[in-house]
Amino acid sequence: MKTFKGMLFCASAIALGGSFVAYAQEADDSERKLGTVTVTGSFIQGTPEDAALPVDVLSAEDLRLEGNPSLTEMIRNLGPSSGVDGQTNQFASNGLEGTSNVNLRGLGPARTLVLINGHRQTYSPFAVGEQAQLFVDTNMIPKAAIGRIEVLKDGAAALYGSDAIAGVVNFITREDLKGLEVSGSFSTWDGNEDGDYDASIAYGIQGEDWSWVTSAGYQYQSEVLFNEKDWAIPDITENPVAGFSSLSNPGRYVALSALGAPAGAAIDRGCANTGGVTNPANGQCYFQFTQFDNLQEETKRYQVFSEYNRTLSIGDLHLEALWGKSEVPSWNTSPSYPPQVLTSQFVPASHPGLQQYISDYPADAVLGAGAGALYIGRTFGWGGFPGTGFSQEGSREHETYRLAAGLKGDWENGVNYDLHVGYSNAKAKTQTNDTYIVGLTAALRGFGVCTDPITGFDPATGTQPWAAGYAGALTAGGGTCEYYNPFSNAIAANAVTGTANPDYTPGLENSVTLADWITDFGSDVEVTNDLLVFDAVFSGASGIQAKGGEVGWAAGAQFREESRKTDPSDLTNLALTPGPGGTGAFSFLAGTTAADAEQTIFAVFGELQVPLYDNLNIQVATRYEDYGGEIGSTFDPKVAAKWQATTNLAFRGSAQTSFKGPTLNQLSGVGTTLQFVTPASAFKAVDQFGNPSLSPESAFSYNFGAIFQTGNFNASLDYYSFDFSDPIIVEEQSNIVAAAVAALATPTTDDDAVLTRITFSDNNNDGLSTANEISRIRTNVVNGPDIQTSGIDLRINNTWEDLIAGGDLTLGLDGTYVIEYQVDPYFVEGVSIGGGDYAGQFNRSNFTRSRPQTKANLFGNLDFGDHNVRAVVRYISSYDDERGTPSLTGAFTGGPSQIDSQTTLDLFYNWQAPLDFDFGLSVVNAFDQDPPSAYFDTAYDPYTHNPFGRTIKVSVTKRFGAGS
């Protein structure tokens, strides 16, 4: 299919461009270039930028004056944006390291349509975990190629179709560069000793009737551990959920009698000697896995964008190509993950590590008095992973390319046409290590390395050497067979501090060979998304005169074909390696199945611009989009108006319905995320199952506002409201767990249906399911509850010319206030789940993201000649953690706790120096404010705050030739 799409794209591009070369040769100087502008939010050429729609425009110059921030930071700082990915966060956004997205209004990254030069780009392959939402990876766009960014803060499905519920972000590249431009920057912050840097180069040629501009970028981010920030590694008494797990190594044990019945329990007494954390609430040894994780991953990113424009006798030809690649070559994670099923972790009484432990601590002799003991813990912890001496390492790789061609012109009758074809492809591969279930069982019995880790079979006999009737030659711990030792006497030193363990017994350590044998890539998946789009838009003047002028019109059609292919490795593929329980061969990460799916979408749309009076302009638009099959079709109208009440004062407003169709990953397949489960005091696997019966989600939204302008003073105030129906969500595991715990506590069975969503581990072999034995949770992708949200946007700025030393002073404010985010309850297996006003909350207990009610930026800018000084005060209001306050074992109780507000100051200086040099110096978070503490694994909210503290950045740009 991919080959066919490529051939189809090439044929279409040739049809648009190649056949017109002869016309280009005939064109003379009298042929004009199209000078009209199509603003995001309208297909009618010549639509003014101050039309009825709330569009913010960020130019390349705006970004330069704020230190050319990364696109992640630029998006995070937008007032209407909240809950974005971009910071390292393996605990909630699995597999997304190295990517970034846009989340307008906090409605979800998939509900903001991201365009490149007004046209669609394919989704990044891996979805946001909480809502299985696919999004466009904005990190693939080189900053050097960006001319401006238009942000439409309004529903736009009537024009653009699916995804444009919260709005549209349109990255428009620059085509006017002439000459060579080379840029570079270096930034550093406390803990990031090696620093981060980026480099870019752009070259443009401007011909008489053609132009060619190519930009390339490279960014490098250094690896920085959480340990580099004191606030990120709090004590368990300060923040019991900041990376702490009750499944540790050293761990704890349940002694088993000769008949296999529980006969006692013990906690490994070497916990403190290995640097473990003893929880004062229960005396158990806890593991803090964030000490092995990165605050920032080492990331290498490459981007190239090239566009060619030519004026032909019949219009303007546009060709563009994009390639980008992001690599996280050494993704640090915990030395091992907690197992989902503990009953297979049997340590026989003859185990040498157990015998040594009893010798060191005779008080725990019960562990060896019977058949042995069950080990309750993870394979590697405070001693690190033997293969690296520290963390386990995986990798993340994302790559995308895009080819597009367009022809824009007009006919003699005044009708404009805009024809476009685009093909984009995004591929991502993740590799994450995990422990073999049966391999661990074999190694605990002394048959590690010498057997098959997937089945435990002796290669010579095809049977397990510890099973009854085994007739092979293998013996426990003999020859090449090795024991896995879970006891503290296997740990030579704490892997974080290097402090020696006095209980360590040489010869009982777990070898590198054993560690490599017992672990492998439990998740090794490559996913590819493809998008082929044909657009045809026609527009012009209707000949119908309203009192304010001639009515403009636009009409068009769009064809999209989306495909998605999931290609797991043989070990990850459940069809090939189902494992002992059908979830795969590994103890924590579930496998998946290969998939190859596609869907075709067809749409037609129309738009009218009606200048009803000289001071009143109306926009009317509508779109019909058909997904076919069970999903069906949608019809979405929109009306917008702007009334220029006086010379200085105007009012604008709009109302529309909008929609988002389900994406291919939501319709089928199984995905697994790692989420903290409070009753188990540990991370557990949460499986997400696709749903082929999903309906499109829809919304009715409206906004109205006022614009005031006099002289150099500008102000706007807008109110927005969204009313969702059938939003596509992933059922929240914490709600399902809470309902299951409640069902376990009741003597009746009428509420037990929810227990079918839970897999229990029966840690103590008593045949009873308890809350602390939850090992796996099933969630489904469903059409969720209705959502109503509303808020206010405010923008004010004024410029005083020649005020200070002949320079212009500009002061401004932009801010967003969320009035409400009301969510109805929904039902899982007959149990009512959630509901309430989620505005001003952390929202870790539901399917949404953190939602501070107020975000504001106050800036001052002094421009005097070749020098520019800018200061920005950024404010994020406090918000509640609706779960309450965690106990030492991680259970949340009481009323809401609070995540504090944050106010930071950013300073920027730019000098346009002689010889076409530009120098920049920026100090972000000048007073080095720590991010507000949050009850989360990272100890802060990675969707909202920047964790780096004071960041100093220097940049330089050199232009050769005429410049831009």
Image (cartoon, grey):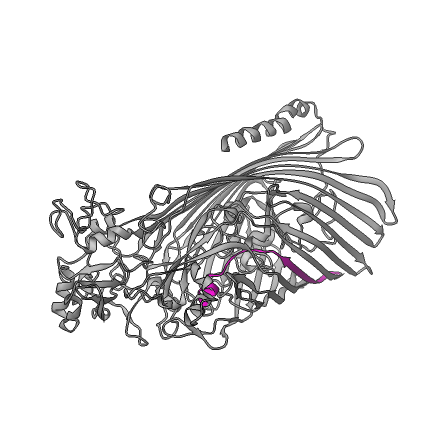
Residue at 19% over, 64% down: 259
**Percent position (x, y) of residue 901?**
52, 71
Foreground residue among 351 and 142 = 351
Q: Which residues are magenta?
A: 711-738
**Percent position (x, y) of residue 326?**
44, 46
Foreground residue among 425 and 325 = 425
Residue at 30% over, 75% down: 282
- Residue 686 lies, with reference to residue 524, above or below; the image says below
Question: For residue 572: magenta?
Answer: no
**Percent position (x, y) of residue 197?**
43, 51
- Specify whether residue 150 is in view: no
- Residue 853 lies, with reference to residue 515, above or below; the image says below
Answer with left or right where residue 385 lies relative to residue 920.
left
- Quadrant where the C terminus sits is top right
- Specify whether residue 715 is in view: yes
Task: Specify the quadrant of the image occupied by residue 81.
Answer: bottom right
Answer with left or right where residue 906 lies relative to residue 48.
left
Question: For residue 735: magenta?
Answer: yes
Task: Specify the quadrant of the image occupied by residue 656.
Answer: bottom right
- Residue 206 lies, with reference to residue 763, above or below; the image says above
Foreground residue among 796 and 116 = 116
